[in-house]
């Protein structure tokens, strides 16, 4: 794993023990696909990071020097994953944020995960997601819910798990957003109360017709005509199974994947 | 700040960039008062850490070598704060916990915070605490709610803020538990759905009569005959004011403080 750590814009050797990212999860992250030596959807990732930083009151570092560092890490990588972690920096005793925080930024390069099956199997997770409007939508570092949900199964045939909030509304998978087609409309959960607004989800909502953000229960997903997951590393993942429910290969989803790949060639490998 | 970092029981120089504590808040912590060179309430802190580790599925390190390290850090310190952070260790891409985690433990020594006023002033925080039974009660590293709540005010006359959960039930202060006396009974919020079960709170519930764990709303606290906060660093903090509500000095609270100091001499400095 190649890693570069910055305190403000100064390169440093290590994460400080009093970093608020470690002590409180006081920060944000982005998981970015690397393709042909370039971070994919960088502007979209940066925009989400900026929005999260504004929500948490963390000063956003300058973009240009970090992008230059990111590019230099990605150089020569045909396919990889770039992770960016931004924390409020040092100050790990006492919750009050320092008056003049010097954020920490960690850039790390990782191998692409093994390819997903062409049609994935899901399960329902028992771990609920908390309703927390103050944190919903942003990709913050408080991810114990995702960790506990992902710990629920080890069966390698199950690719992902779906989570509901404490009121029983579907939110997302542990590391992806979910779309379910009902009466010709793709519906994806509203994330005002829980969940992370994914970059691939945003792309779909912005570029495709017949998409709707809504509140849905388990039965909506289970009775849908087709279901897929999506995230910024894997693109669109058609779902073949959720518990006892099976779905056939869905030409509409195949078509969506083609249009995503046409718009963003990094996802063309899925074809 | 003196710091010692361990991976398993091996001393290491730095926190790894892929530590799950940093990446997901996947861990726990304890904030321990140091008095006369010794960590105060160590067995109680260790028991809570063990309980949290069991809840999160993090292997608990052996106690004896860590206690020896803690003692050696605390040696010669008349009054200080020892912080212990335990994380699931490395493995920061992908939520699935490693099959064979090697936990990280960070011990750090900090100066005692400035003394609290003899009678403190509180406010209500707007940030709600999420209802999350999977995480309630334990002192995990997902503390953005506390950070956001503590960011709500900078008035130095306000010592602490009280939080309610998303359903309006009182939970705790940003870094303390709360007790309110009604009809001669000290009532403290039930923490099955949110909040951290504090060591000082546990001590009071185990050693004092006329204590009750209950569900309470704001109005219960505001109409109480007396209110105090407590935590393991500061002991019992009598409350003089909450918004417009003022309380006179309360002899019953003074008495409780005396009994705590008699049982645990580290808190005798409050007298």
Image: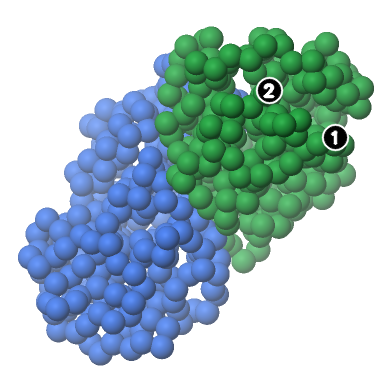
Chain colours: A green, B blue
Left/right placement of residue B139 relative to residue A262 reads left
Secondary structure, mark 2, is: strand
Q: Residue at x 32, y 84 (%)?
A: B240
Question: In x, y percent, where is residue A144?
Answer: 48, 37
Left/right placement of residue B194 relative to residue A165 reads left
Q: Nearer the viewer, mark 1 or mark 2?
A: 2
Asked whether B65 or B26 is in front, the reply is: B26
Compared to B156, does B196 lie above or below? Answer: above
Quadrant housing residue A256: top right
Q: Quadrant of the C terminus of chain A?
A: top right
Asked whether B109 or B84 is in front, the reply is: B84
Q: Quadrant of the N terminus of chain A?
A: top right
Left/right placement of residue B24 relative to residue A56 reads left
Question: In x, y percent, where is residue A159?
Answer: 57, 17
Residue at image mark 2 = A226
Give the numbered dot on residue A208: 1
Asked whether B183 or A8 is in front, the reply is: B183
Quadrant housing residue B123: bottom left
Q: Residue at x 20, y 60 (%)?
A: B213
* Residue A5 can be seen, yes or no: no
Compared to A124, does B123 lie above or below? Answer: below
Question: In x, y percent, where is residue B186?
Answer: 18, 70
Badge 1: chain ID: A
* Residue A239 can be seen, yes or no: yes
Quick one: label 1, few (<14), some, or many (20+) residues within 10 Å?
few
Q: Residue at x 7, y 65 (%)?
A: B209
Q: Residue at x 25, y 32 (%)?
A: B63
Badge 2: chain ID: A
Secondary structure, mark 1, is: loop
Quadrant housing residue A182: top right
Question: In x, y percent, where is residue A5?
Answer: 68, 37
């Amino acid at each position: 794993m190649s890693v570069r750590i910055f305190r403000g814009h100064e390169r440093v050797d290590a994460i400080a023990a009093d970093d608020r990212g470690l002590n409180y999860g006081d920060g944000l992250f982005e998981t970015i696909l690397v393709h042909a030596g370039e971070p994919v959807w960088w502007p979209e990732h940066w925009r989400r990071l900026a929005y999260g930083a504004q929500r948490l009151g963390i000063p956003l570092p300058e973009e240009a020097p970090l992008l230059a560092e990111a590019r230099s890490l990605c150089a020569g990588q045909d396919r990889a994953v770039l992770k960016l972690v931004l924390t409020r920096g040092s100050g790990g005793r006492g919750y009050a944020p320092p008056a003049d925080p010097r954020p920490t930024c960690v850039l790390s390069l990782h191998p692409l995960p093994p390819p997903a099956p062409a049609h994935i199997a899901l399960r329902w997770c028992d771990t609920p997601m908390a309703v927390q409007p103050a944190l919903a939508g942003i990709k913050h570092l408080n991810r114990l819910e995702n960790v506990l949900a992902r710990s629920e199964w080890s069966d390698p045939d199950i690719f992902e798990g779906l989570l509901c909030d404490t009121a029983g509304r579907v939110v997302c998978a542990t590391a992806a957003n979910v779309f379910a087609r009902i009466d010709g409309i793709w519906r994806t959960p509203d994330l005002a109360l829980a969940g992370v607004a994914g970059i691939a989800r945003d792309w779909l909502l912005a570029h495709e017709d017949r998409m709707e953000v809504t509140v849905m229960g388990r039965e909506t997903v289970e009775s849908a005509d087709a279901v897929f997951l999506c995230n910024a590393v894997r693109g669109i993942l058609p779902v073949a199974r959720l518990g006892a429910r099976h779905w056939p290969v869905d030409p509409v989803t195949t078509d969506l994947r083609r249009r995503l790949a046409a718009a963003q060639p990094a996802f063309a490998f899925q074809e």
